[in-house]
Amino acid sequence: MPREYLKKATKTAVSDAGEVHETVKTILAEIEAGGDARAMEYAAKFDRYDGNVILTAEEIAAACEKVPERIKRDIQFAHDNVRRFAEAQKATLSDVELEVVPGMVAGQKAIPVDAAGCYVPGGRYSHIASAIMTVTTAKVAGCRHIATCSPPRPGVGVAPAIVYAAHVCGADRIIAMGGVQAVAAMTFGLFGLPKANILVGPGNQFVAEAKRILFGRVGIDMIAGPTDSLILADETADAHIVATDLVSQAEHGYNSPVWLVTDDHALAEQVMERVPRLIEDLPELNRDNARAAWRDYAEVILCDNREEMAATSDEYAPEHLTVQCEDLDWWLDRLSCYGSLFLGEETTVSYGDKATGTNHVLPTSGAARYTGGLSVHKYMKIVTWQRATRDGARPVAEATARISRLEGMEGHARAADARLAKYFPDESFDLQADA
């Protein structure tokens, strides 16, 4: 039978893109024209904060003092895991040198971008882990300057734990500013910052739209939508664990989709019965988000077998993909479209979000079909180079001249002709393309 929807989403995770686009476009244009002063006006309006924009060393130290030692140890633990994983990723990149023909050598180099801008959400939730994920990977990549922006709270400033995380992970500047104005500050090089070459990190729809508009002018990690999660579960899964994991991801936001794909009808019914009760047990803000996400965006899908389950998962291409099934190696080999994969009940998206070492900045809205998440590689430019002897360049020049003329690009052909004439003046070459 075709897959059956025991629960179908009534909404899709798409914002009013047109309205958001025009708002963000206007703000960016005004800040670019008005510089620091205009950015500060927007900060006063949206952040309602009038303290220092660039935190001083003394302010950073004072914020760090407010963080309990146990939390500091937890942040350091997560930082160490992310750093070591990023170092292992970087080790997979190597410079390459190949003699393509005798005397003609081509090569590849991996070069880190110079300046990275890391956005760390701090409004509804203080995303301490986002500071760890974005700053650590930029540091390991070798970026020479790392700026971190996070929304300050009125009368408080940037959350002390975010300041501590950004500081210990290697941020060169910590900026008390959020929203579009923060993205603009890093992009345009306001407040004495170097202009960012790449913008990374999660944010609300306005931050995401600002990155979308600026892409091309600067690099970005990805164009992100609301976070989403899918769980594959068979009859061996624990309904309480599955329901708890779904709720843990639904609390991200009112429009954060969560999906359960299973081949066991009884399990599906148990999970659907448990989820609302677990949601009602959450604190108020978390409860409101999870309730709306479950009501409007969640789906429960019943399949015939595991192959159909896997095909459904690949079609959805979730940001987070959890497998709570038998034969985990089969799933690891079979699945191909996801941001990050969590195999077995002993893992959970929450681990990856906070402290496992893999990055939690991941592709959403089906983008896992064509890209992975934030990694040390995102900060690296893979560039090529070449060098040749005159004899080594000879066959390449001849082929280049003929191909160029066949294309109609006479100027390209003459660049090759000139070298052959200089290096081999006593020889003749057939450099005309065959009709």
Image (cartoon, rainbow, N blue to C red):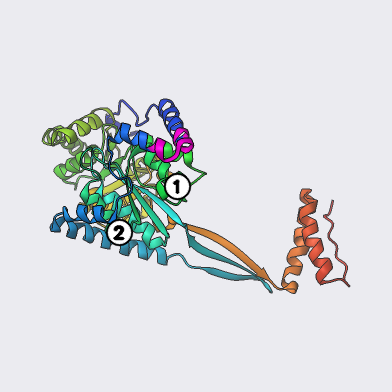
Q: What segment is highlighted magenta in the picture?
A: 29-39
**Residue count near mark 2 (Cα–Cα under 10 Å), binned few <14, some 14–19, many ≥20:** many
Residue depicted at x 49% and y 46%: 218
Q: Which residue is mark 1?
A: 189
Q: Is residue 297 visible?
A: yes
Mark 2 secondary-structure assignment: helix
Where residue 147 appears, as percent x and y from the top left, is: 37, 52
Q: Amino acid at mark 2?
A: Cys
In the rendered structure, which disc, 2 or 1, sits on the residue that comes first in sequence? 2
Tell whether position 116 is magenta: no
Mark 1 secondary-structure assignment: loop
Q: Which is nearer the eye, 109 or 42? A: 42
Q: Which residue is mark 2?
A: 169
User: Which quadrant of the structure image shows residue 304?
Assistant: top left
Cβ–Cβ under 8 Å for marks 2 and 1: no
Q: Amino acid at mark 1?
A: Gly
Where residue 318 appears, as percent x and y from the top left, is: 34, 42
Residue depicted at x 47% and y 51%: 197
